[in-house]
Amino acid sequence: MNKLKLLLGVLGLAVLLVLPAQLKNHGIYLFTYWLIYVMATMGLNLTVGYAGQKSLGHAAFFGIGAYTVAIMLKAGLSFWLGLPMAALACFALGLALGFPALRVQTIYLAFATLGFNTAVWLVMRNEEWLTGGTFGINNIARPEAFGVSFDGNLAYYYLVLAFTLLLAALLWGLLRSPWGKAFTALRDNPIRAESLGIDTRSYTLLSFAIGAAYAGVAGGLLASLVQFIDPAPFTVEASIMMYLMVVVGGPGYFLGPVLGAAVGVILPEWLRFAQAWYLLVFGTAVVLLMIWLPDGLLSIPDRIRAKRQSRAASAARAAPVTGARP
């Protein structure tokens, strides 16, 4: 099984490296857009899927990252300074947003994060002196490094792919460290986790802060991709869509954001001919998924494996009974 996963991972990476070079500009742009959402939902998956917190404010951090990079570029500062600042700003705000999670849980925490998203969006729309308001910020430059320009769509795609792989590697290491075990313990049974000596307060705050930092990096890369930002992509509806991406892909599955973001970003493009019906189909599919597959699409192999093991166990229990006849 591990060899199969390794093989699939190598094949997937090969596709990501080779396929976009064969596509036209729009296809390259779409794949870049998808990778940015993969990064953003990786952070949300840590908060929701691994730590078990309910967050409907992720698009706010996405927007904060985008505006931080855009504003700093407009001020004449470097993209390579703006992107870490976006991550740090979102980390600090995510840490602050985690405090309500220490007092409220489930639906109440979801409403608290939703209110945060609404407040941030209102700042983006109304504070024109800083954000440009509904007119937004345009002419956002793409970066360059060591004399290499990432202005072209393909070059920028590979830059975003590099950031995606870097953040994925960092998250992979985090989840396999004692921190990762603490996050899952916090999700599965907070009371038992606390009895085992895990500082649930700290890990709750960290789950929000790290998830927000991922969204900040993704937002900063989005700003240079589209080269124009306004408040529209960072609404509460965008946060709900990100949450659905995590749910559809599989909360608590490492590759869940990859599949969930593909459903939310690439699939609508493929179904453009039925765009009027897409939201209806998507909404119906999510409802059915929550009923029949609450753990997301990536839980299907685990369910099949569990059924096979159950059948094998039943057959093993039945074997002595049938063989015991005189």
Image (spheres, rainbow, N blue to C red):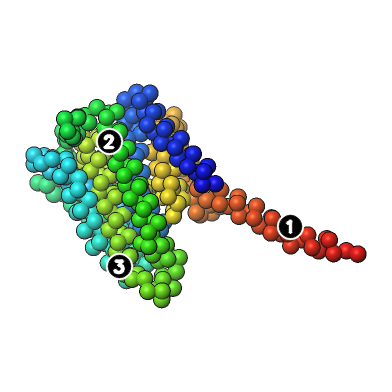
Q: Residue at x 17, y 49 (%)?
A: 85
Label placed on residue 143: none
- Reading the chain from its start, which is encountered first: label 3 or label 2? 2
Label placed on residue 202: 3
User: Could you say which quadrant of the image residue 99 lies in?
Assistant: bottom left
Three-letter code, disc 3:
Ser
Residue highlighted by disc 1: 315
Residue closest to the far bottom: 195
Task: For mark 2, give the secondary structure.
Answer: helix
Task: For mark 1, give the secondary structure.
Answer: helix
Q: CA distance from mark 3 to mark 2?
A: 33 Å
Three-letter code, disc 2:
Leu
289 over 270 or under it: above or below:
below
Q: Is residue 106 visible?
A: no
Closer to the camera, 23 or 130?
A: 23
- Reading the chain from its start, which is encountered first: label 3 or label 1? 3
Label placed on residue 159: 2
27 over 170 or under it: above or below:
above
